[in-house]
Image: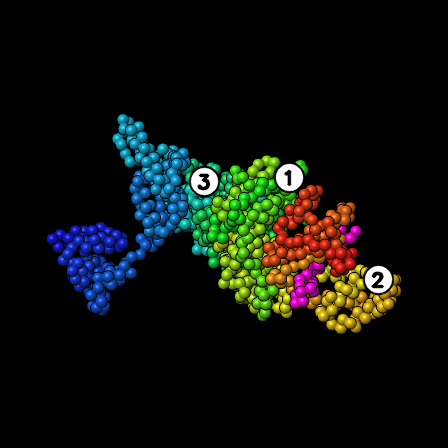
Amino acid sequence: MLDCLVFGLWTVFVSLSLDYPCWTLSLGFWITCCRTIACEEGTKCAFLMSLLTDRALEWASAVWDADPQIKASYDYFSGMIKEVFEYPAGGKDISVRLMELRQGSEAAADYAIRFRTLAAQSGWNDAALWAVFRAGLHPALQSELACHEEATTLSQFVATAIRLDNLRRQHRAGAHASARPQRRMDYSSHREEEPEPMQLGRSGLAVQGHRSRGQMRLCYRCGASGHLSPRCPERFPATPVGDISSFLNLTVPASLHMSDRCFPVSALIDSGAAVNLVDRGLVEELGIPIFPCVPALRITAIDSQPIGEGYLKHQTELLDFQVRLFHYERLAFYVTSSPANPVILGFPWLRRHDPHISWQSGELVRWSITCQRGCLRDPVARPCRTSQVQRPLEAAGGHLPSQYMDFHMVFSEERAARLPHHQVWDCAIDLLPNASPPKGRIYPLSLPESKAMEEYIESSLAAGHIRPSTSPAAAGFFFVGKKDGGLRPCIDYRGLNAVTIRYPYPLPLVPAALEQLRGARVFTKLDLRSAYNLVRIREGDEWKTAFHTTHGHYEYCVMPFGLTNAPAVFQALINEVFRDLLGRSVIAYIDDILVYSASMEEHVIQVREVLARLQQHHLYVKLEKCEFHCSQVTFLGYVISHQGVEMDAVKVQGVTGWPEPSTVRELQRFLGFANFYRRFIRNYSSVAGPLTSLLRGKPKKLSWTDQARTAFLQLKDRFTTAPILRHPDPELPFVVEVDASCSGIGAVLSQRHGEPGKLHPCAFHSRKLTAAERNYDVGNRELLAIKAALEEWRHWLEGARHPFQVLTDHRNLEYLRGAKRLNLRQARWALFFTRFVFTVTYLPGSKNGKADALSR
């Protein structure tokens, strides 16, 4: 019995000697079935030794006596054999063999067996395997499959391909049975008059062409003069046939640079193309020099039909070629007729640059290390032939340093507009017990607003950010104006916010975080793009965000602006992304991120880590609002440098622009304001002495002197050089003092530190009224002052830990929140105010001197 087993196993071993995994698996089965051999380790090792031959036997004989463990452990002996002899067939790993797999003229069932064998060892997902299997099928069968797209899984698709292939073979066999003997099916048999496909060798050149190129002293690879084939810029892959078929392709923006001008083109990356191609029309339009190919190369499409003339007869010289924004190289192209794709980058280009391609999205996401070292560099400013073409990352004024070019996707506006996936940090909208969102009114819109609404609805539906709704809830939809004259869509979520359970996640303590900046000398500021829209509404809660317009009823799939829990939800997401970096190299406040480091080398590493995490979590950044590698940066109203933290000069501009007093009342207001900050100004009493002396005896008329003018100017100068403003503390409630005059509006952001009744200012804001705003009545001007203040300090007031207080000298504004009748302007502003939690308190003008002075 043992002899029979040995003979049978020897036969199996000899027939599979080039496939070690199959042989060793079969050996294990035989040993398991044979009780005699399975008893002792030494017997199994000797039996395994007896089956080896040729090189395996020579190697085993050399180590048999040198290593005693070989004789004592079958697992050890078989492991050593695996280490020595298990290597990819032909030197190619599974992935390469899988990508090169083609059906040819064999049956689809046989091709599927070879495919499944390699697929089981590849570790690829079904999406990638699906694309590989389809690309390997014969073009005629691929055309048939295009009409049978009912398959939803890879197994169903393979079964469909086998079924269609069998039907085609049966049909062909039956049609020709009476005319001639049945023969093996060959999809290529109908091409009787066509020349045979060109066989490409290592250099991609037919054998008969070597001699002619050698005689003409041309490069064997590209046919050009001036270099040898080992240094040819184009090295073709070893492929059996010169046909071009589509395996994986995507389109990227590119440009050709000639005579200090750039010509934008669309480049198709096609892994099935054996060469790089350029359209003949583009060559003629740009006047690109070309020379003939000797001999011509045959070219066919995926359906085996010739592309253009069917042969490549000309090639360009080396051209300066740019892919996307930062990838530069010199590249030669074969000339063909392909107007749909002016430039085709084939497998030679992919093999040379080895870019990282996302199988899920089918996009080029990162350049290889080789490209980062040799091909990537800052864009070269060259005029384009059309004013409509602009570099995507520099069009808005931003500049991305070369160290981060491989993270350009993080700055993609197009990707930021896509619908994000559901995550653990989705925005939940939990309602109070027995509460439901009320139904709001439909706001009438003007013709421009109606057009803007239609465009917004259409784009949001296309992006998946909203969807049609049947929800019983419905908030109002309206627009507010932007600074650039555009319209910003807004949803009236006041009713929903009133019945929503607050999410208690805290916003960061910015002053405490800024204390971590000690020793930092290099700063980078990042501003996230469409931050709230990067978070999904929790599945099942979308109906609560419903809004209605004159054109339909919709609900949000992403987190919109205006929800009461939106700041806390997004802050929870940001904290989770940068949890181990916060307080060490990163400060993150909602959608504003600051990266700080002690040295440039350390800083680049830390910024790359931040960008990598943003890319991993599908968060995107506005390049035009970023600042990289700064020694001083403005962040959340602070001017930060290695010397410390000080207030932004823009914030104190309202103080330094104070006009010279002309009445006693104006001087009293200025001194009252200045006295409030006296402990921040060195020698305040001495500097302010000439001014305070003018008020002695309670004069009715101001007697302005040169000494008073000098003191006034000197005191204002001290405001610009001394740290007079307190750092805002999110742990304390804010107080916003506002006032409006006939010429301007003013506001003061304050907090109570220490003494309960004493307000300490944190920032100032003032501006002149426009011509239209001067026509507002008193109530609207005061309301405008509140709106301007909340816009100026939104980063502190929106989502504040405590409700804040607005002080105004206009009593009617106390009833703003509960007003039943508002004009259109007041209604828009009132809806903007719903993003904040505050109360309005009346304060007579005589007690509101700081804001009143700023407004004047």
Q: Would residue 805 be found to the left or right of residue 21 on screen? A: right
Q: Are marks 3 and 2 in contact (CB under 8 Å)?
A: no
Judge the density around disc 2: few (<14), some (14-19), many (≥20) Cα neighbours within 10 Å: some
Which is more toward the observer, 620 or 829?
829
Dot 2 lies on which element?
helix
212 magenta-colored = no
Residue 757 falls in which quadrant of the image? bottom right
According to the image, label 3 marks what residue? 311
> What separation in Å lies between label 1 and label 3 (alpha carbons)?
64 Å
Disc 1 residue type? Tyr
Judge the density around disc 1: few (<14), some (14-19), many (≥20) Cα neighbours within 10 Å: some
750 magenta-colored = yes
User: Where is the C terminus found, in terms of image quarters?
Assistant: bottom right
Q: Would residue 538 be found to the left or right of residue 758 on screen? A: left
Q: Residue lying furthest left in this view?
A: 1
Which disc is residue 664 wearing?
Answer: 2
Looking at the rendered image, the disc whose residue lies closer to the viewer, 1 or 3, is 1
Residue depicted at 59% across the width and 69% down the height: 518
Judge the density around disc 3: few (<14), some (14-19), many (≥20) Cα neighbours within 10 Å: some
Disc 3 residue type? Tyr
According to the image, label 1 marks what residue? 443
- The magenta stretch is 741-770
